[in-house]
Each structure stands twice: as C-alpha cells, then as structure tokens.
Image (cartoon, rainbow, N blue to C red):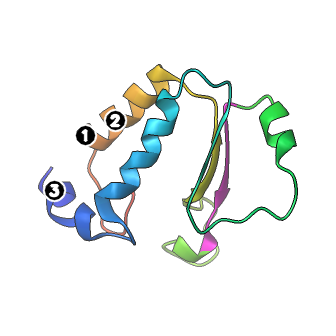
Amino acid sequence: FPFLRDHMDKNGCCGAAELIKLTSYRLLQYHRVIHLDADTIFLNSVDELYDRDYSLIYTTDPNMASHKGEDKLPVQGGFIVMQPSEQVYTDLIHIVMNTEFAKGGAW
C-alpha cells in the first residue's frame, strides 16, 4: 500500500517504530505482559493487572479522535496489558500488511 509506505514513517511521534509494540505478543514465556512507553510512571502497584482474566487491557485517547464526542476512541498505545499470543501477533501483522492505512494513523 503506497500510503502506508509513504506516510506511516512520518506519522505520530515515532512513525513505523510504533509497530515494535506488536512484538510484545511474542513474549510467550509470560502469562501477561505490560507494555509501557518510556514516559510512563506508576504511582501505585499494578499487581492486579496481572491477575485480571482479560486477553487485552488498554486505555483510549480522546485527544486523538477524529471528531469530538466520537463513540469509538483510538487506542492509546503507551499502556497495553496483553496475554501474549503468536496467533494474535500474526493476525495484527496481517492487518498492518494487508489493510489500507488511513491518514491520521489508523487501520
């Protein structure tokens, strides 16, 4: 997809380097992985995040929404709690490689 190739590297703070977050799904030796941006600080214990029975926990970012008041908000990639899965990793790579990347930073 030409748009992905031509624009993703210039998109957001880190461009294509943002995709490194997907490799957290390949840490199969762990039951749960917390992926954080380097500018994240915890003020309390996060132990309970490891005990939750969800395959994915994330926050949203209303400031990145296309329109104010949107129902579907973009995922804030700076804080993601995931259950590693090779299949999910493969599915996400397939989306990145085979789905049109939209201007503004979304698939």
Query: Disc 1 marks which amino acid?
Result: Met
Residue named by callout 3: 5
Closer to the N terminus: mark 2 or mark 3?
3
Label 2 SS? helix
Query: Residue 95: x percent and y percent?
Result: 34, 38
Query: Disc 2 marks which amino acid?
Result: Ile
**Which residues are the magenta region?**
55-62
| Residue shown at 82% from the left, 48% from the top | 46
Answer left or right for 23 relative to 98: right
Residue named by callout 1: 97
Query: Residue 83: x percent and y percent?
Result: 63, 29
Answer left or right for 98 relative to 29: left
| Residue shown at 48% from the left, 73% from the top | 66
Query: Residue 93: x percent and y percent?
Result: 34, 35
Answer left or right for 25 relative to 60: left
Q: Is residue 58 magenta?
A: yes
Label 1 SS? helix
Q: Is residue 85 magenta?
A: no
Toward the viewer: 90 or 101?
Answer: 90
Residue named by callout 2: 93
| Residue shown at 31% from the left, 32% from the top | 94
Q: Main secondary structure of the magenta part?
A: strand
| Residue shown at 62% from the left, 72% from the top | 62
Query: Disc 3 marks which amino acid?
Result: Arg
Q: Are marks 2 and 3 in contact (CB under 8 Å)?
A: no
Rounded to the nearest angstrom, the CA distance separating label 2 from label 1 is: 6 Å
Residue 3 figure quarter? bottom left
Residue 85 visible to an observer of this rendering: yes
Closer to the N terminus: mark 3 or mark 1?
3
